[in-house]
Image: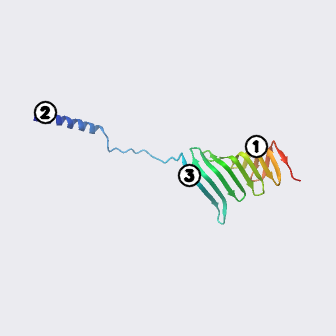
Amino acid sequence: MAIRIFGVLVALFTISFTILSLQDPYSLNLKAHSLNFKNIEANDLSAYELNSTMVKSYYKANSWMRYENEDVFKDFINLNLDFNLSANILKLLGKDLKQVIFEGDVVYLGEDGTKVLSPKMEFNPKDKILSTHLGFKAFVNGNIINGEVLSYDLKKKKLEIQGAKAWLEK
């Protein structure tokens, strides 16, 4: 009887050491881990652009969502020294953020009194050109211009329009 118990214990001992020898409990997984922020969300954002003497620009958005290739801001407002701009949605597209799209009740108000309203506008940051192909209403020095296509060069203050219907003040 003692030999049988000893045999069973040796068999259990052999099985347990066989299982333990097949496992690798102390190995380290040394893969390079990096944080990848494909999706980020933030609420109630405010940002200021400063120089040494004053605030140059103020940016405000109710929410911000970052995806892999775009940033989306909701209820965006930009108060700038040269112009004010607001939209329901602002999208910054591409990894270099080279394309900027404003959607939903877009309002541009320049320092010279130029006001442009449109449902959707695109902005080219490199050339400083604001454009739309979905129709617009512009107010320039008391004149009202409705049109289909608009391109406004912010550097040169040059407004190019197509399909215009205008009410001009004398």
**What percent of the width, then of the height, locates residue 63?**
59, 51
Report the amino acid beneath label 2. Arg
Which quadrant of the structure image shows residue 31?
A: top left
Q: Residue at x 11, y 34 (%)?
A: 3
Q: Residue furthest left?
A: 1
Question: Sequence-wise, which precedes: disc 2 or disc 1?
Answer: 2
Report the amino acid beneath label 1. Gly
* Gap in angstroms between the C-alphas marked 2 and 3: 70 Å
Report the amino acid beneath label 3. Ala
Drawn side of residue 32 relative to residue 47, left or right: left
Density class for disc 2 (Cα within 10 Å; few <14, some 14-19, many ≥20) is: few
Q: Which residue is drawn at 10% across and 35% down?
A: 2
Q: Do the residues labelled 2 and 3 touch (CB within 8 Å)?
A: no
Kindly identify which residue carries mark 2: 4
Kindly identify which residue carries mark 3: 42
Q: Which residue is drawn at 86% across and 50% down?
A: 168
| 7, 139: nearer the viewer | 139
| 135, 161: nearer the viewer | 135
* Gap in angstroms between the C-alphas marked 2 and 1: 94 Å
On the rendered image, what quadrant is the N terminus found in?
Answer: top left
Identify the mark at residue 150; answer none if there is no mark.
Answer: none
Q: In what element is the residue under mark 1?
A: loop
Q: Residue furthest bottom?
A: 53
Question: Sequence-wise, which precedes: disc 2 or disc 3?
Answer: 2
**What percent of the width, then of the height, locates residue 106?**
70, 49
Residue 127 visible in this rendered orientation of the protein: no
Density class for disc 1 (Cα within 10 Å; few <14, some 14-19, many ≥20) is: some
Q: Is residue 40 above or below residue 20?
A: below
Which quadrant of the structure image shows residue 9?
A: top left
Drawn side of residue 64 relative to residue 1, left or right: right
